[in-house]
Image: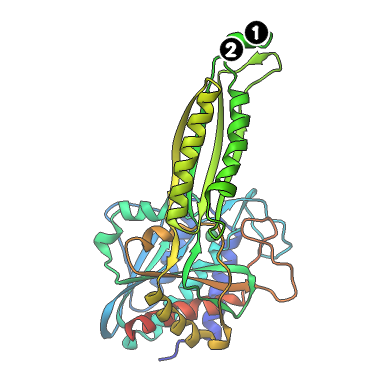
Amino acid sequence: MDIRLTDEEEARIIEFRHDMHMHPELSHREFRTTGNIKAFLSSLEGIEILELPKKTTGVVARLAGGKPGCEIALRADIDAICQTEDNDLPWKSREEGIMHACGHDFHTAGLLGAAMILSRNRDAVPGTVDFLFQEAEETTDGAREMIDAGIFEVIHPAAFFGEHNRPEVPVGKVVCKNGALMAAKTNFVIRIFGRGGHGSMPHLCVDPIVASAAIVQSLQTIVSRNTDPLESVVLSVGSIHGGSIENLVVDKVEMTASIRALSIEARERAVRRMETVVSSTAEAYECRAEIEYREILPLTFNSEDMYRVAVRAAEAAVGSENVIDVPPTLASEDFSVFMEKVPSFFYWIGSGTPGETAYAWHQSRFKADDAGLKVAAEVMAAACFAFAER
Ligand code: NI
């Protein structure tokens, strides 16, 4: 078996990637993208597209290997974000205000590359390989949507592998992290209710703006005073809305906020403290508070067992000298939803061009170097063999 991507195969996924990059689609609307993925997969020997009980904008496909073994799933995400591309590329986004600024085009093309390698080597492939092209990672509800659509009625993987580009890591390197890789996240809305009236008679009103100012300040103490200094927690109020003109006391203020942490315990502690700070501070200012939870994501965490398998696969693809460790980030990733259900591993694939500024995920000048696609493909293909040999 040869897990190397051939030059022709590499050219095919680069071409696919450039076309996908020019035509980015937002979460839940990845129709063109999905059509092209299905067409590409259908051109490969031994790969069958699977139907889920309920429709989604993702794609699930299967390859039956020629050797006995278990079932393994490989996952890529496929959606873009609202961003205007500020790169001067021949294959720059053609869609106004939409861009593959997180490199999900890179992941999709990489997984198609893995599908080509595995299809060509299918007689040597142990067990079954499932290919999962997941919609709506950016809105972080795509993984749950696929589960609700019945993905686990159709596939029964013993392990999941996923990957993400990392512009700060140079092309050719693969990051294998043992433990927490990306943050658990809780997004929420805080509403503070007071009693409106004329600004000249504050004693007859209850001002939620003053209470909100105190809440924003007090929330800052959760990280500085209630969190173990050796833990990583971010608590941010991202927006605050209330009021219209200077001489009216308003009835209501609404804020959106987020808590991120690299451990579930630290996240839960911060959430409980946030609830107390919000309700008690509101009460101190004679207001009423309401908290609505909007988005809750698990931790992206690589277990030691899966780490060992993943390192072997990465070494097979790029050599042990190119398998590295870097600090985690407090960004989050909805692959973590699959991680809660099935033993899983999440890679970062180096996608930075040496000598160029590495613009981070979601920036208008974000780039992921095409040269990393070959690595992305080979690591995923190698993971199937490494898991079978564990
Ligand atoms: Ni992403």
In percent of the image, x 51 and y 81: which residue is there? 9
Residue 231 in the image: state x and y as whole percent: 53, 58
The N terminus, quarter of image: bottom left
Q: Identify residue for label 2.
A: 205
Relative side of 304 to 330, left or right: left
In percent of the image, x 33 and y 52: which residue is there? 55
Amino acid carrying label 2: it is: Cys
Q: Residues within 10 Å of mark 2 (few under 14, many from 20)?
A: some
In percent of the image, x 44 and y 90: which residue is there? 2
In the figure, 316 relative to 41: above or below? below
Residue 349 in the image: state x and y as whole percent: 55, 73
Splitting the image into 4 quarters, where does residue 198 fall?
top right
Relative side of 293 to 364, left or right: left
Q: Residues within 10 Å of mark 1 (few under 14, many from 20)?
A: few
Q: Identify residue for label 1.
A: 201
Nearest the eye: 284 or 307: 284
Amino acid carrying label 1: it is: Met
Q: Ligand 1 sits in which quadrant?
A: bottom right
